[in-house]
Image (cartoon, rainbow, N blue to C red):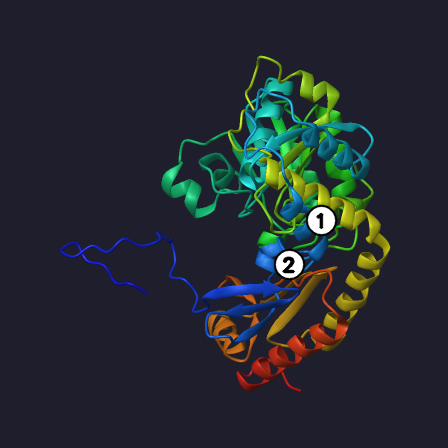
Amino acid sequence: MLETSDDNPIPSVGRDLPALDVTVADAFDSTIRDVTGRTYLDFTSGWCVGNFGWANPEIRDAVLAYKGPDYVYPSYQFQPWDELASLIGQLTPRELTHSFRATGGTEAVEFALQMSMSHTGRKKFVAIQESYHGHSLATLALGGGEFNSRYLGTCNGFLQLPLPLDRTAAIRLDELLKNGDVAAFIMEPVICNLGSALPTQEFMTCARESCTRYGTLFIADEVATGFMRTGEMFAFELFNIKPDIICLAKSITGGYGSLGVAVTTSSIARSMHYEMSTYSTFGWHPRSTIAAIATIRYMMRNRQELRQNVLDVASIFRKELPDTARYTLRAAGLAIALIFSEGADVSHIVRTTQKRGLLVSQLDSRTLSIFPALTISPEEALRGIRILQTTLHELGYASI
């Protein structure tokens, strides 16, 4: 890494944290190759971007074959936009008919917040405490925590609900909503950004009922969990509920472009007319749109096989990484996390597995996140698990 000083500045990529010691040259299926030629088994999928394997040939070929315009001004019409909106509508609940174009997850959530304010005339929001919904000021503030208290102490309209999401949390949420001044309740149905935390069925049922009772919109942030990460098309389907707005991004293009979507009902969409703006200069860029169309078509053709593979591989993780005195495994399909006890050095685990050819992700000081491609073979998954098992054993976190 280049070193800089005030006396001798060297241009470099700005980062909030130092880069990991992996300089990527290529990627294919569940493998990443660095500039030295070394290969790594990828258990991160770019944090749920590469759900269908890197360099998926069907998606790649569609992007390479594209011969249309390099850019389309958002106020014009573009036939692939209509095609993509139609495909998304075939996957989402029947009532959600309008897809608003965005560049990624943060922008999709921003649009969802605007929709909620415009439709309800309210300005308050409820989110899960310490949750993550993007990297704009508003999306960072939703979950509260250190960022909100340090930089945005004036965001009093952002309320938080602490874990666990059980009957007690459902009662607390109802109390927060009953004054009728909350525009929306937003959550990841499986909270990847809190170590794959799972709500109870009772909480999800009651949350949906409370939102309906008090005129609060329910926003499902499916940026990470969408497109079969949990085995279902969307994680909210695990709980048999329907949100008012769904936010999508990440794996929607298979990694071939940046694209986000906020999907909602026609009545909520109408409330945006002349009230709020969802203008996005690069929202649904033409090539990203072609990649998204190809990705969804690939997923629709292979839906049953993908779902079965997610279930099969998830069962291997549960069998091979049972809870110990030092960690607990959480999993919903292939949204997996190991939650370690106090005193664990998760960064050391990540560095050690990397040296052995396995890439996993540190979420925080106690949490290891695992997001394999949904196309990973059971044999590859087991190979990566063996590397992780050996590392955990040698570092004293598990026995073999």
Residue 340's label in the rendered image is none
Judge the density around disc 1: few (<14), some (14-19), many (≥20) Cα neighbours within 10 Å: some
Q: What element carries label 2?
A: loop
Quarter where residue 261 is shown: top right
Q: Residue at x 49, y 42 (%)?
A: 144
Q: Nearer the viewer, residue 216 or 254?
A: 254
Residue 262 x %, y %: 65, 33
Residue lying at the far right of the rendered structure: 304
Q: In this view, does 132 lie above or below 33?
A: above
Quadrant for the C terminus, please. bottom right
Q: Which residue is drawn at 71% across and 77% down?
A: 382
Question: First in sequence: mark 2 or mark 1?
Answer: 2
Q: Nearer the viewer, residue 64 or 44?
A: 64
Eye-nearest disc, 2 or 1: 2
Q: Residue at x 52, y 76 (%)?
A: 38
Residue, disc 1: 166
Q: Is residue 167 visible?
A: no
Type of amino acid at the residue the image marks with label 2: Ala
Quadrant for the N terminus, please. bottom left
Residue, disc 2: 55
Type of amino acid at the residue the image marks with label 1: Asp
Judge the density around disc 2: few (<14), some (14-19), many (≥20) Cα neighbours within 10 Å: some
Q: Is residue 302 above or below residue 245?
A: below
Label 2 to label 1: alpha-carbon separation: 40 Å
Residue 293 x %, y %: 71, 41
